[in-house]
Image (cartoon, rainbow, N blue to C red):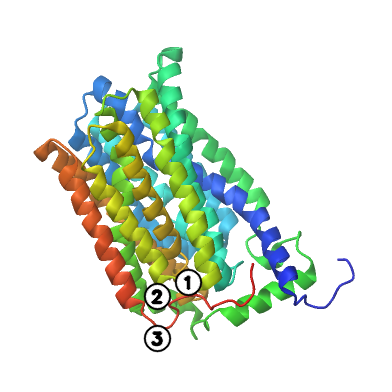
Amino acid sequence: MNGRTSIPARAGDEAALFHRIGWRLLPVLCLCYVFNYLDRTNVGYAQLQMKEQLAFSDAVFGLGASLFFVGYAVFEVPSNLLLARIGVRATLLRILCLWGLASAAMMFVRTPTQFYALRFLIGVFEAGFAPGVLYYLTLWFPRRRLAQATALFFMAFSVAPILAGPMAGAIMTYLDGAAGLRGWQWLYLLEGIPCVLLGIVAFRTLPDRPAEAAWLHEADKARLQALLRADSPAPPADAHSGLGAAMRDARVWVLGFVSFLLILGIYALAFWQPTMLKGMGLTVMQVGLYAIVPATTGVIASLLVGRHSDRTGERRWHFAAGALAGAAGLMLTTRFQHDALPAILCLALAAAGTSSAFTVLWSMPGSLLSGRSAAAGIAIVSTVGGSAGMVAPVAVGAIKAATGGFTLSLLLLSSALVLAALIFVLYFRPGRPAMSGPRRAETA
C-alpha cells in the first residue's frame, strides 16, 4: 500500500506487526470473553437471592451449574470443526446471539426443571467459543508469541471476576424490585442482552484470516505467512482427517486431562466462592467487592507468567509453579473459612496460581497440530477440560451438604492441582516434540 514489496526482517518490524495485530483482534475477543464468563457464572451470585424466592437447594444449584457443561461438552468439537469451515465471524455471530438470548431468558425461571433446561441450552449455545478463539489465534501468532497472545485473551477470564462481583452486587442490591423484577432477574437480563450486540460487532470487525485484513500491508501479510509457515508443524496429508489426527495424538488427551484437573479448582471457586464469602457474614455487596482481590491477582499473574514463558520458551515449570501455588492457596483457605481477610488472601494466591497455569497450558495445543487438526485438537482439550465443570459445582455442593462446609472440597481440589503439575512436568519432559516454543535470542 505504501510502495513496499519486500518482507520486513528486523525484530522491531516483527514486534510492531504483532502489536498491530493484537490491538485489532484482542479487544473485541476479550470483551466477548468477559461476557462469556459473566453469563456462565452469574448463577453463583444470582443464587444468593434465588434460594430465598424459589426455594432452590444447594443440590439444585450444583446440578444446574453442572448441566451447562454437559451441553457445552456435547457440542464443543462440532462447533470448532464448523468454525474451520465457515470462519470465526459467522461462528461468533451465531454463538454470541444465541447464548445471550438464552442467558437473558434465565430471568423467567420458576422451577428446577426450567433452571436445568436453560442452563443446558446456554452450554449448547456457548460451545466452541473459547476453543474457537484459541484456534483463531493460531492463524495469526507463531508459537513463540502464542503464550502472550493467549495470556491477553485469558486475561479477560481473570478480569471478568473483577467486574462480576461489583456488577452483581450493585444490580442485585439497587435494582431489586425495580419494574417488579427481583435483583437476580435484572442480573440475567443486563448480562445477557449485550452479547447479542457483541456478536454483531465481532461479525463486522474481525477478518476470518490474515489475507482478509484490510488494515495489514501486503508486505506484512507476506511476512506473517512466512513466520507462521516456518513455525508450524506440517499439516496432515489428508485435509479431511483433522479430527482423526487430533484424536490419535496422545498429547492432546494428556493436555485435556491436565486441563480437567486444573479447571476443577477454577470452576469450583467461580460457582461457590460467593457462597463461601457470604457464609463469613458478608452482605451481597461486600461479597462482590471482596471478590475483586483474587480476580485482580489472577490477571497480573497470568500476564507476567505468560510473558516470561514466551521469552524463555519454557512451559513445564511455569505451569507447575502456577498449579502448585494454586494448590497451596486452596489448602491454606481451609484454615481461614471464618475469617474474611486471610481467606481472601489465600484465595488470591489460588487465583494467581490457577490463572497463570491456565495461560501456559493453553499455549500448548496450537503447537501440536495445524489446520483442521489444530481446530479439532483444541476442541478436544477444551471438551475434556471443560467437563470438569460438570463435576466441580455438583460435587462441591454435595460435599458441602454432607459435611456442612468447604474444607474437604478444598483439600480435594488442591490435590487435583498437585497431580496436574506432576503429570505436566513428567509427560512434557525434554525430548518430546512440541513441548515448548523455541527459545528466543531477541526480546519482544
Marked residue nearer the N-terminal end (3 or 1): 1
Q: Which residue matches tag 2? A: 246
Along the line of sight, the residue nearer the viewer: 251 or 432: 432
| The C terminus, quarter of image | bottom right
Looking at the picture, how far across and down is residue 391, in whole percent?
A: 23, 51
Looking at the picture, how far across and down is residue 378, in whole percent?
A: 43, 66
Q: Is residue 147 visible?
A: no
Q: Which residue matches tag 1? A: 374
Along the line of sight, the residue nearer the viewer: 371 or 317: 317
Looking at the picture, how far across and down is residue 214, in whole percent?
A: 76, 60
Tell me the quarter of the picture where residue 430 sits.
Answer: bottom left
Is residue 288 placed above or below 31 in the rendered structure?
A: above
Which is more foreground, mark 3 or mark 1?
3
Q: Secondary structure at mark 3?
A: loop
Q: Secondary structure at mark 2?
A: helix
Q: Which residue matches tag 3? A: 431
